[in-house]
Amino acid sequence: MKTYTTDYIDTFITAADDTKVTCGTVPPSRGNKKTIAEMQYELLAQNPYKFSSDDVLFQVFADRNDLTEAEYELARKQFFSKGQPCFRASPLTKTYGFGVHCDNQGKMAIYGMETPDYEKFVADKQLKHVKAMKSSK
C-alpha cells in the first residue's frame, strides 16, 4: 500500500493572501463539538515543534472519529494511503492568519501574521516558502 505524506521540511507556509484577519486569531468554538481549526490550533499552540503535519492531521481525524489508541496504527496507514490536503489548506493558514514553520525534522509551530517571528521566517532565505491556499478562486 502506497503511503502519502503532508510533511514539509525547512519550510514556511504563509497565511493566505485573501485572509480576512490582520493577526493570528484563535479559532472560535461552534456548539459543543470542537472544529477542525480549534483542534489544530490547540495541538500546535500547546506543543510547538512537537508534531509533524501528518501527526496533527491524523490526530484530528482520530479525535473526530472517536478512534481508540489501539486502532491508531491501522487507521493511520489507511488514512495516508490516500493523498490528504496539507497545511496549505488548513483553516489556520487560510482563515485565521497563521503561518506555519516546519523545521528540519518536519515538526511544526504556528505564528500569527502580526508577529516578529512570522516576519523573520518570511525573510529567511534558507527556508522554502509556500503560500496557503486562497479561500476563493
Image (spheres, rainbow, N blue to C red):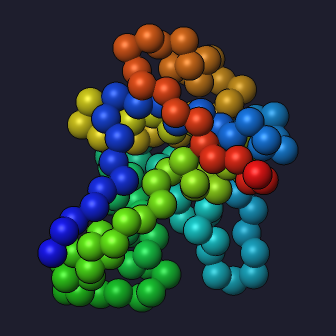
What residue is rendered at 42% in x and 88% in y? 66
Image quadrant in which the N terminus is located: bottom left
**In terms of depth relative to the viewer, which is nearer, 95 or 6?**
6
- Residue furthest out toward the left: 1
Q: Is residue 62 above or below residue 112?
A: below
Q: Provide residue 104's location: percent of width, then percent of height.
A: 26, 30
Q: Provide residue 120's location: percent of width, then percent of height.
A: 54, 15
- 79 vs 128, left or right, is left
**In terms of depth relative to the viewer, which is nearer, 123 or 40?**
123
Q: Is residue 42 above or below residue 101?
A: below
Q: Provide residue 83's location: percent of width, then percent of height.
A: 37, 66
Q: Is residue 43 visible?
A: no
Q: Is residue 27 visible?
A: yes
Which quarter of the figure has residue 61? bottom left
- 109 vs 104, left or right, is right
- Number of labelled discs? 0
What residue is rendered at 39% in x and 36% in y? 102
Q: Is residue 91 above or below residue 20?
A: below
- 44 vs 28, left or right, is left
Which quarter of the figure has residue 67? bottom left
Which quarter of the figure has residue 112? top right
Q: Is residue 14 above or below residue 73?
A: above
What residue is rendered at 72% in x and 26% in y? 114
What residue is rendered at 47% in x and 13% in y? 124
Q: Provide residue 80's location: percent of width, then percent of height.
A: 29, 69
